[in-house]
């Protein structure tokens, strides 16, 4: 597992659920991890994520440079505009 950043995206709520998804957002930044799951692990992730989430091709920045990757996302019409997790302001 390697740290990676997905630029020009934001993490928001999957509408009507407590779960996150990603949406394009100019200037946005989402920190995450770059992994290479074995086939059995990928199958388990697919079952866990369910039918609504899809693996979408993205380009991420890691310490080793830019990498092609895929990220779990729902269709944009199902994404809320509320940041996930919600931030609390003092």
Image (cartoon, helix red, strand yellow):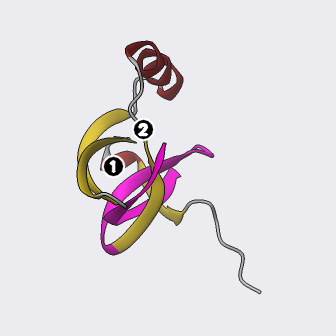
Judging by the rendered image, the residue that carries numbered circle 2 is 35
Q: Position of residue 57 (x, y in %)?
A: 23, 43
Magenta-highlighted stretch: main secondary structure?
A: strand
Q: Do the numbered discs 2 and 1 sit on residues whose CB atoms are within 8 Å?
A: no
Rounded to the nearest angstrom, the CA distance separating label 2 from label 1 is 27 Å
Indicate the secondary structure of the residue bearing disc 2. Answer: loop
At 47% from the left and 61% from the top, the residue drawn is 31
Seen as rendered, the residue at the extreme front is 64
Q: Is residue 63 above or below residue 78?
A: below
Name the foreground residue: 48 vs 65: 65
Seen as rendered, the residue at the extreme top is 40
Q: Is residue 88 above or below residue 75?
A: below
Judging by the rendered image, the residue that carries numbered circle 1 is 77
Seen as rendered, the residue at the extreme bottom is 90
At 50% from the left and 17% from the top, the residue drawn is 44
Is residue 14 highlighted in magenta? yes
Mark 2 or mark 1, earlier in chain: 2
Q: Position of residue 73 (x, y in %)?
A: 37, 43
At label 1, counting other C-alpha atoms closer than 10 Å, the crowd grade (few under 14, some 14-19, many 20 or more) is: few
* Quarter that holds the C terminus: bottom right
Residue stretch rendered in magenta on the structure: 1-27
At 33% from the left and 33% from the top, the residue drawn is 54
Is residue 15 highlighted in magenta? yes
Asked if residue 15 shows in the view, the reply is no
In the picture, the disc for residue 67 is: none
The image quarter in which residue 65 lies = bottom left
Q: Position of residue 33 (x, y in %)?
A: 47, 49
At label 2, counting other C-alpha atoms closer than 10 Å, the crowd grade (few under 14, some 14-19, many 20 or more) is: few
Name the foreground residue: 10 vs 62: 62
Decide if residue 14 is on the left or right side of residue 57.
Answer: right
Indicate the secondary structure of the residue bearing disc 1. Answer: helix
The image quarter in which residue 38 lies = top left
């Amino acid at each position: 597992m390697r740290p990676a950043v997905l630029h020009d995206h934001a993490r928001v709520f999957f509408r009507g659920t407590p779960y996150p998804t990603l949406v394009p957002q100019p200037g946005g930044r989402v920190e995450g991890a770059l992994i290479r799951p074995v086939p059995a692990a990928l199958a388990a992730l697919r079952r866990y994520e369910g039918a609504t989430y899809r693996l979408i091709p993205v380009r991420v920045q890691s310490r080793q440079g830019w990498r092609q990757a895929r990220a779990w996302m729902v269709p944009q019409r199902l994404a809320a505009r509320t940041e996930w997790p919600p931030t609390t302001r003092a």
